[in-house]
Amino acid sequence: MTNSKIDISGSYLIKTLLIVGGILALCYIGESLVLPLLVAAIIAALLDKPTKKFKQWGLPNWLTIILSLLLMIIVFFLLSWLIGSQINNIASDWPTIKDKASEKLNSLSQWANEQLNWDYENYIENNKRLVQRAESFASAFLSSVMNLLSQSLIIFVYVVLLLMQKKMFVGFFKKLSSNPSAMGSILTDSSKIISNYLLGKGKIMVFLFVIYYLGFRFGSVPYALFLAIFAALFSIIPYVGNIIGGGIAVILSYLYAGTTPALIVIGVISAAQLLENYVLTPWIIGDETNLNPFITVFGIILFSMLWGMVGAIIALPIIGVLKVIFEHTKGMEPYAYLIKKNE
């Protein structure tokens, strides 16, 4: 009789669960400490590519770091100014948007009562509460963004220190391992995945923004610039981001302007997504991350529960780094196989 049972050590399983649970608890409880450091590490890995480029031009190390930081600051302030100006425009028109939204919702509710025989009493008051919940959701989103911006100074300090002391940190991790060359490969591949993915996503977001803006402007969609920026920025979150950004753009355009602008937004976003999935992503990013879609979506949900919107944005780079670590660690190959996209 053959032994059909799988030999798994109970103590090993318990240790694994305790370690994973401890790490997740540390990430949740120590959010104010862990999150800025993790974001800074990702930004430092992203800036490693322009830093190396400047070094190839024969510039000294301190000057390459300064130029890379200046590039980051310029992009950050331009993006903040653009988003802030559009939010101010929306905020000034918010009473009008609320009134039009309530009017549209009341019309839909009345139509449902008359045509579908829905017994929907007090729908006017219910619709007012629905608009208020949407307003509170928008306030919570802005609060999350402002919380990240409030930590931007400490993140900037971390980035500077990580870039200045890169050799020390690389040496430290190599000394932790019994195989320094393997650790060097982990660090190099991790930095490559982070920089190539985020830079590639940045290029795709620019392409999508141009397509969205031109399409919305051509269709006379209100707040075309804001909706284009909003939908393009959310595309940085794989799978889920396109649904959230595009869905909110459709809802806002419908509630404010009606059916035709909403249909135009749906058409433009659908065409842009086809272009992104079949042309832009294979061309710009390719198989750089090569992650399992299920693990990707699960990771986005997990990190968004831990750290909100910021967690959803940095989830894929973190999972990509975990894949690299598992691939270069003896005994962890099955986990790398699970994370990796398998044809």
Image (tube, rainbow, N blue to C red):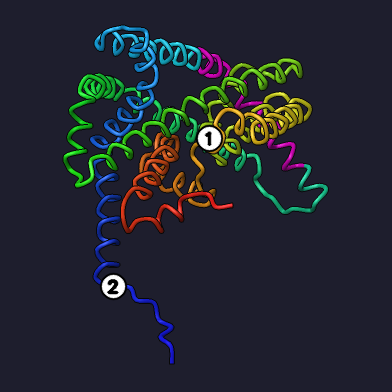
Above-or-below relation of 246 to 62: below
Q: Which mark is residue 132?
A: 1
Q: Residue sitting at 31 percent across and 11 percent down?
A: 64
Q: Which mark is residue 9?
A: 2
Residue, far right: 115
Q: Residues in magenta?
A: 85-110
- Asked where in the image residue 22 lies, by quadrant, the reply is bottom left
Q: For the residue marked with disc 2, what is the amino acid?
A: Ser
x and y percent of residue 169 in the render? 20, 31
Q: Residue sitting at 57 percent across and 39 percent down?
A: 130
C-alpha distance separating marks 1 and 2: 53 Å
x and y percent of residue 114 in the render? 81, 47
User: Is residue 69 found left or right of 134 in the rendered image?
Assistant: left
Dot 1: within a 10 Å radius of its alpha carbon, few (fewer than 14), some, or many (20 or more) residues? few
**Of circles 1 and 2, which is in front?**
2
Q: Earlier in the sequence, mark 1 or mark 2?
A: 2
Above-or-below relation of 273 to 220: below
Q: Nearer the viewer, residue 165 or 263?
A: 165
User: Is residue 110 found left or right of 56 in the rendered image?
Assistant: right
SS type, badge 2: loop
SS type, badge 1: helix
Discs 1, 2 touching: Cβ within 8 Å: no
Q: For the residue marked with disc 1, what is the amino acid?
A: Gln
